[in-house]
Every structure is written in structure tokens, then in C-alpha cells.
Image (cartoon, rainbow, N blue to C red):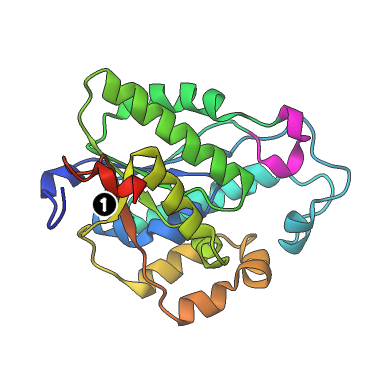
Amino acid sequence: MFGPLDPREFDRILVISPHLDDAVLGASHLLHSHEGSTVITVFAGRPAEYPAEPTPWDALGGFKAGDDVAALRRLEDRAALDVLGASPLWLDFVDHQYLPKEQRATAAEVAAVLEKRIDEISPTAVVLPMGLANPDHVVVHEAGLLVRDALEAGGSERSWFCYEDGGYKHIPGMLAWRVAKLFRSGLWPTPAMVPVRPDETIKRRSIECYTSQLPPLREDHALDERLAAHVPEQYWRLAPPPEGWEGLMDA
């Protein structure tokens, strides 16, 4: 399917966010244009124990040893989503920066929880991150695809989209890599005409609620430059190719 979308697809929107800021950085126009949407943040849990010294990202945000980083960031997230008229739902998976690789959540583990939440919310559209560069983003993207496959196999009908992950989409080749990977999988990503009313003032106000995230986002993700450039948000429909077009995958 291509061209204008059926407005009914956006009756109940669910955006999946890897961390407590990603949905706002990549999909705030969508959320503000469709108030009442829900944002599930996957890696919003507290670690069993924070590092003795804050991680480089947390240190840039002003945190000190003993601070409950996740608790403050949840408060920031609620404030940011209030600006957009959206509701938060936080999962308890732990950010990879606090865990050795062997203890990090897998896509299958995340998918098992996401599927239950999606079933409870019953959205008409699910919007995943493209899953670029950051390992948590990759896991959330892959988990979302697992859930989509399971629900589609069960006869569920809803629309699936991806949004581009904030600053990561500007890393050379990252977005192209994901698009190519999806294309080869047979689930074609297609830029979609998603109905939104861009409001840069509201977007900036929402982002500024993430007080502890602003310094590292400015230093590592060129946040100010991206906002000044009014970098557009793009949404990609995830759907099989039109009948008869499958041969393009072999071209």
C-alpha cells in the first residue's frame, strides 16, 4: 500500500521507545498531533546496583555516585510526554550501560513482555524505532519485529511503522543499513504520509524536560544543531511488498 493513509489507522497510537527520551526525540510531532497516544519505554528499569562511579553519559548529565538515575529520568519523561499529551508506560529492563553483555536483555525477552502490553493496549498503529547503532535500540527494534510476526500470524490486523532514531540516523550508513536489512527480509520499509502537524516550539519544550539528558545529547548527538536545522521526522511503513514486486529483492 502506498499513497495517503487511512486516518483510522491512527485512532490509537503506540510508540515504542528504547530509552526515556527516544520517542520524543524521534516522534514528538506524531505524539503531539495525536494526543492520547501511549509511549512504552523498554529500558526504564533500575539496575540492581548502580556503578560506583557514574557512567560517562550519566556523569555528563550531572549525576553523582548514589543518585537514582532511573527515578529522575522517569519524572523527566512524564513531564515531556505531558507536553505532548501522551501517556508513559515504563518497562523494567535495564539500560545496557549498567550491565555486562551477558546480562543484557535479548530481543526475545523484550518481545515476550511487549506482546502482552500491546495486547492490553490494542493500538491501531505501532511505531517502532529503526534500531540504529545503540545496542538497546537494536534490541527494541528486533523485539518489535518478533511481536509483529507473532501477532500477524495470529490474524491480528494493525499498522506497523518505524521512526528514525534521533541523532543515530545521522551516523554515516546507519539508516541505509537498516533500510537494506528490512528490504532483504521481505518486510519493505516505505516512507509514509503520516498525518502530523509539526510544531517545533512544542517539540523543543518537550525535549527540554529531559534536563539530565541535555548535556550529553548536546555533546554526543549534536542536539542543538539538529533542532536549529529543523531536521524532519520521517515515519516508515513496515509491510510486505506489493504482489509481483518481490523480484526487486534479487535485482
Counting from the top left corner in percent of width and height, residue 117 is at: 39, 26
Residue 85 on the magenta span: no
Q: Left or right of 248: which side holds 65?
A: right
Q: Which of the two residues, 211 or 200, is positioned nearer the viewer here?
A: 200
Q: Which of the two residues, 188 or 121, is positioned nearer the viewer here?
A: 188
Counting from the top left corner in percent of width and height, residue 236 is at: 32, 53
Which residue is painted at 27% across and 25% down in the image?
A: 152
Q: Left or right of 53: which side holds 186?
A: left
Q: Is residue 50 visible?
A: yes
Q: Left or right of 96: which side holds 207?
A: left
Q: Looking at the image, is 86 positioned above or below residue 62? A: above
What range of the chain is rendered magenta? Answer: 94-103
Residue 97 on the magenta span: yes
Could you tell me what secondary structure mostly forms the magenta stretch?
A: helix
Which residue is painted at 58% across and 39% down in the image?
A: 44
- What is the quadrant of residue 66 in the picture? top right
Q: Which of the two residues, 68 or 106, is positioned nearer the viewer here?
A: 106
Q: What amino acid is found at the position of numbered circle 1 in the picture?
A: Glu
Q: Is residue 42 visible?
A: no
Q: Residue furthest front?
A: 251
Element type at mark 1: loop
Residue at mark 1: 35
Which residue is painted at 55% across and 38% down in the image?
A: 139
Q: Looking at the image, is 11 positioned above or below residue 225? A: above
Counting from the top left corner in percent of width and height, residue 108 is at: 53, 24
Which residue is painted at 54% across and 79% down in the image?
A: 225
Q: Residue furthest top?
A: 154
Q: Looking at the image, is 40 positioned above or below residue 26? A: above
Q: How many marks?
A: 1
The crowding category of the residue bearing disc 1, from other C-alpha atoms within 10 Å (few below 14, some 14 to 19, many at least 20), is some
